[in-house]
Amino acid sequence: MENYVSVATFTNEVEAELAQTSLAAAGIQSFLKYEDTGGMLPVLQGSEGIEILVEQKDLDEARAILSEEAELGGEG
């Protein structure tokens, strides 16, 4: 995973998984990095967040996709 970098951090699992689905639809492989000590301390997800990791080569495209999703979500 040395070629993977963080593209975004979310405060809950649902938002992180929705963003990951958007990336997958664009053909970008990603992984979620939880900071909850293996599920033993789920309260840490809220304070530390859940990161989405993508390959370095996909970083700019992933940022653009997630930025567009955020803009669309904010139009309600």
Image: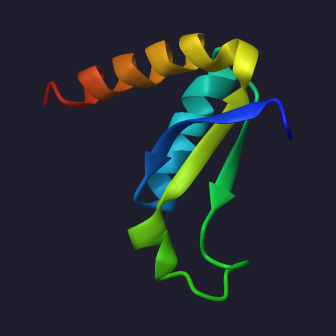
Q: Nearer the viewer, residue 11 or 5?
A: 5
Q: Position of residue 62 (x, y in %)?
A: 57, 19
- Observer-nearest of 23 and 49: 49
Q: Residue furthest left?
A: 76
Residue at the location (51% across, 48% down)? 16
The quadrant of the picture occupied by the N terminus is: top right
Would you say 33 lies left or right of 51 here?
right
Q: Position of residue 3 (x, y in %)?
A: 82, 29
- Residue at 70% of width from left, 30% of height from top? 54
Left of 69 or right of it: where is 6?
right
Q: Position of residue 72 (x, y in %)?
A: 27, 21
Query: On screen, 23 above or below 27?
Result: below
Image side of residue 23 versus residue 54, left or right: left
Is residue 5 shown to the viewer in this render?
Answer: yes
Tell me which corner region of the image, top left, top right, bottom left or bottom right, holds residue 68. top left
For the image shown, how many numbered marks are present on the structure? Answer: 0
Q: What colour scheme has been applied to the protein in the rendered image?
A: rainbow
In this view, the residue farthest toward the bottom is 40
Residue at the extreme right: 1
The quarter of the picture where the C terminus appears is: top left
Residue shown at 60%/42% (left/top)? 52
Specify the farthest residue to the front.
2
Point 61% across, 76% down: residue? 36
- Is residue 27 in sight in this rendering? no
Q: Quadrant of residue 27?
A: top right
The quadrant where residue 61 appears: top right
Q: Position of residue 71 (x, y in %)?
A: 26, 21
